[in-house]
Each structure stands twice: as C-alpha cells, then as structure tokens.
C-alpha cells in the first residue's frame, strides 16, 4: 500500500449541536436533551448532495483528519481524508460526529443528567448501534440533507453504516461498510465481557460512580484495552507482525519483563499515560454499546444485509455535481 | 462420543517426594531441595515396564482420576483412567504429579524459601516446560523406571510430552501429545500477557508479595481465568456451543447482566467461590510458566517434533507384559 503524501490537515469546523426533542432508544428509554460533537470539513453544495458521513470505530472519535486535542495523535483517517486525498474536502462536505455515549463532547456518561444534576456515569442508558445512527439522522436533518452521498466506516463504524442502510436506505446513496459484521459472534461477546469485567474489577470503578468519587478505573481499562487489541488483528496477521520475536533482546529474561514484541505492543497500547489522558467515560460507555450491537433474533440481524443488497440493486443516479470517489477500491483494502 | 460408565475411582496412593540434589533450571538458577506431590494408581510390574506418566494441563493437577480435595470436582480424566477404562490400573502403573511450581503440594511460590524462611511468592524462579519434565525425570528415577510405557497429556500436558520425547527419547516408548503445540503463537503469548496483567492490576497482588500480606488477587485472577477460557474453545466451537443465545431470558436487558450464554459461562468459570477455594499461587505460577514454553529460536523449537518423528520411526518392541492401550485411537479425539 502506498502511503499518501503528508499534507496539511483540512480546515475543520467544530461544533456541538444540541437537540431538544427526545431521542427514543432501543432500550425503551429516551434521552432529552442530547448533544452531538461534530467536526466538518469542506462545504455543503447548493443541492446538498455532496455530504459524506464518516462513522468512527470503538476507539475513534470525531478527530478523523486532524491532530487529536488530548492524545496529540494524528487523525485516525488522515490517509483518506484531506486535500487531494480520496475523500477531498474540496469536493465533499465531510461530517464526522462523536457517537452518542462517546463522551468526546457528545452526550455520554460524563455529562450531567438533568434529572439529578450529577454525571450520568453508570446510569447512562445502554446505547446500541441503531441508537447512534438514530442520533446521526437528527444531525443530518439539522444540516438539511435529505440523502447522504456516502456513509463510510470500519469496524464499529461499519456496523453504523449497515444500520444506516437498513433503517434509512432512501437517505444513503452509497454505503461503504469496511471490515465489519452485522452482529457479534460468541467470541466477540466473550472478549467484551472480559473487558467489562476487567474494568469493573478495578476498585476505582466504585460500582460505576467513579466520576463522583473523583477517580478513574485506569488499571482495569488498561487490561480491557490489551484484551481488545488481541482482536484488532487476526491470528495469522498477529503472527506475521510479531511472531515470537523478542523485544530489544537476544534471549528471554525469565522474569516479568515484556520479553516478546507482542507483549511490548500490548503494554504500549495500554500505557498509563495514554489511559490517563483519555476521557475514561468514553471507554466505559464503549463497554456498554457492545452488549446489543444487534438484536439476538437472526431474522432481525439479517435486515441490514438485505437492505444493503436492496440499496445496491436500486442504484439511484449520482447526485448532481458528484461522482463516486476515484479510488474507492482502496477503501476495501484497508 | 460415548460417555464411559461411571465406576468407582481407582485406589490412589498419594505421596510427596522430596529431592535433595539441586535441580538445574532453564533460567540458569537451580532449586534445592524440591518436592513433587504425586498420585499413583495400580502397581509397577516386576520388569518396571508398565508405567504411564500423565502430564496435566495449566488448570489441572495430580487429582486426575478422583474427587478434588479442594474443589470437590471429579477427576479431570475420569473418563480415561480407572478400572475397565482405557488406562486401567489393573494393567498399568499410572503416575500423575503436580508440576513443579504447581503449588498443589509440589514446590512452588507458596512454599517456604529455605534462604529466607518466607514463601517464595514472586521470587520463585520462572519455570519452563523443560524444567517440569526434568523434575519428572527425577521422579521416574525414584521409582526405578528406565523406560516409561507411555507419556500422555493434553494442552500444556502435551507440551510436556513433547519435551519428554525431545530430551529423553530413550526413556519413552510411546509419546501421546494431545491438542498441543511445540510453541506458543503470538496470539497465545498475547493472551497470557493479558492474564498476567489482569492479576498484577489487582491491588491485592501487592507486587507479588500477597502471601505475606495475607491477601489474594482474586479479582485479577477471575479476569485472567475468563480471558483464558476464550482460548479453550476454537472460535467456531465457541459459536456452535453458545452462538448468540440468551441466558434464561427472551430479550436483552440493556444492562450489565450476563444476557448472553457465553457471558454467563465465563462468569461461572471465574466465580468467586471457585477462585477463593483454589490455591491461588497455582494460578500465579501458571502465569509464570507461559513466558518460556519453548525458546524463541525456531531451530530449537523444532527439536521436540524431530524427536517425536524419530521415536515413531525407531519403534522399539513393546515392554514385556504390555500392549498398546486398546482404545488409544479415542485419545486423539478428545
């Protein structure tokens, strides 16, 4: 894969948009008011036909093409989004919002519950993929957009893309779900249970009321993050990348050091400085989404896939002034 | 698979055998004195040719064919070992010892370090598979056995079998490694790193000196045990067994309950009563073995497999009075 040349980050517009009308959730509860923190790049054209919605993954947020204000890391999709790149703000109006419950500015466990005047914390409703998408639809309404030119995302972002295609097929011209699934397997569910239990085993979890106690279950979060990172590469890929190679040494040390490269990689991903500088409720709420990525009924699980096939079969004319992204083929290789 | 009929547990002889001569370890350290806790069934014949050594897995111990004195669970290989079963004490002298470092009576982190008068705890040397087997060879010497009729074991027990075949090929007539490998993959290493970090993240770990502090890192151990249980079934098997089935309910509860059967299974395996009644140092020391299942050099890693092929090619005559187990084919299906 050729690395895209480095170029200046696109000019970004950041805003937090508040919605007063209650948002019904899959759980039967509703949220009101709620806010979404949004970054946009480029300009919506007169026909409102050039909008691309980027859906982020479990570990992502709205800082898709610029330096992250907390971690200092580059935008997570710098490779694709920017001047002269596949998704070019000169051509498209690019929208990326922090998902509902994401806590990087969108309403989530760290926000104040108007009913109590305290952070929602553990009492924040369990959010599903469909809930995230229902909130995003409100955002699209806010921008006056009837039909998105594309909805794009990988992993959990890809699940949102499938939900868009299933529930709002008439509002999506092209759906690009990447490296995703319409449901979690038993192993996926198991991994997330381990992650949640690691967080809850930390005494600083305080039964979920850690914000009030002024502490952070950082050790549990580190372990959860390490477990999650096992799943971000397939077993063969993990072996290709690390094998049994040692980390900066020629022999094992027969101790508890990270002798193997893969151990060092996991520790790096879970390093305290990273955990400490990340809004913890983000991860906490992540743990909550997973429980209901899709309903357990197989019939309902199939719905998004049927919708994707239908969208593909209908194939409306491209919106005025737009053409399919020139290098769309590359997206599927990511 | 047909379940073997229930039959009385075979008569067991339990002993703890102490060895005074130092045991050299792969780490370069040595242990002296050291003890192995051993259970035997049946009688060694006059030719000393009917001995079968059973090697236990990470979560096993020497209670292979009888009720466990602490957990109350049935012997972990009741199906195979007992009167009228594949490995019959009427025919074979069956030996199963708690591995070195295992802490069910064999020398391990809970034992008193003669140099300090306090439990070894974190200061117990890191033990490798080869170390376990080197200690078992002393045990076989103790019984006056030149050649074992068979060495049998699954998972980590199978790794010991491979080590026996590699390092003592002249002392093993038949080696039966089951569901095992001669080395850990990157993913295996990663899983064990997560388990260790979960234990060490527990404040009751006390930097490894928890026995002196009179506490047990039980929460960390629970999480480590849950992570390990993800690996005990392949992904397709996990999905066949649990799928996305719900646990005693018809819909998800949108909370932190174990809604899915696989979540309930993991919680059951890590239940506090089980963790609390298990000698914790066993698990702690387990965490230590894993780091060096085999040396990282691929050339050295291949040695056990070459030895197994060689043992298979040489095929010495069966020891007097012995024949291969009648249903040996079943072993490979376990």
Image: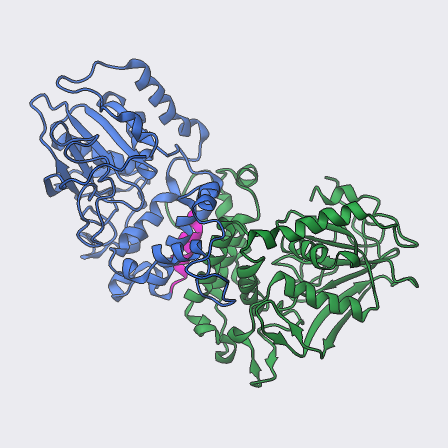
Chain colours: A green, B blue
State the image quarter where residue B150 is shown: top left
Side of B333 where A243 appears, left or right = right
Question: At x 19% / y 32%, what residue is drawn?
Answer: B85
Q: In this view of the protein, can residue A31 be seen by the observer? A: yes
Judging depth in this view, the residue of A152 and A128 nearest the camera is A128
Side of A256 where A178 appears, left or right = right
Asked if A108 appears above or below B232 in the picture, the reply is below
Question: Looking at the figure, which quarter contains the C terminus of chain A?
Answer: top right
State the image quarter where residue A111 is shown: bottom right
**Furthest residue to the left?**
B46
Residue A185 lies, in percent from the top left, at 52, 49
Residue B190 lies, in percent from the top left, at 47, 46
The span picked out in magenta is B192-202
Residue A260 lies, in percent from the top left, at 47, 43
Judging depth in this view, the residue of A271 and A192 nearest the camera is A192
Side of B88 where A170 appears, left or right = right
Magenta-colored segment: predominant secondary structure: helix
């Amino acid at each position: 894969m050729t690395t895209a040349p480095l170029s200046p980050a696109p000019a970004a517009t950041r805003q937090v948009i508040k919605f007063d009308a209650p948002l019904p959730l899959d759980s039967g509860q509703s949220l009101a008011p709620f806010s979404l923190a949004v970054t946009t790049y480029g300009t919506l054209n007169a026909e409102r036909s050039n909008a691309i919605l980027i859906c982020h993954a479990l570990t992502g947020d709205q800082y898709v093409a610029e330096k992250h204000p907390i971690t200092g890391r580059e935008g997570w999709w710098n490779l694709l989004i920017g001047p002269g790149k596949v998704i070019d703000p000169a051509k498209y109006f690019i929208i990326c919002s922090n998902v509902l419950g994401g806590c990087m500015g969108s309403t989530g466990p760290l926000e104040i519950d108007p009913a109590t005047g305290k952070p929602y914390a553990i009492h924040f409703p369990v959010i599903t993929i469909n809930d995230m998408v229902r909130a995003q639809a409100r955002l699209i309404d806010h921008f006056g957009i009837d039909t998105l030119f594309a909805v794009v995302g990988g992993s959990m972002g890809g699940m949102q893309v499938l939900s868009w295609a299933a529930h709002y097929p008439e509002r999506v011209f092209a759906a690009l779900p990447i490296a995703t699934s319409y449901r979690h397997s038993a192993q996926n569910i198991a991994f997330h249970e381990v992650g949640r239990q690691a967080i809850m085993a930390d005494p600083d979890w305080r039964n979920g009321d850690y914000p009030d106690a002024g502490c952070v279950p950082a050790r549990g979060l580190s372990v959860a993050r390490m477990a999650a990172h096992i799943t971000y590469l397939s077993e063969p890929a993990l072996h290709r990348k690390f094998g049994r190679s040692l980390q900066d040494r020629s022999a094992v040390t027969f101790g508890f050091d990270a002798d193997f490269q893969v151990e060092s990689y996991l520790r790096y991903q879970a390093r305290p400085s990273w955990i400490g500088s990340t809004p913890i409720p983000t991860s906490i709420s992540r743990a909550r989404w997973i429980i209901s990525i899709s309903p357990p009924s197989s019939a309902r699980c199939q719905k998004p896939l049927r919708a994707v096939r239908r969208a593909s079969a209908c194939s409306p004319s491209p919106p005025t002034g737009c053409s399919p992204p020139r290098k769309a083929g590359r997206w599927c290789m990511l």
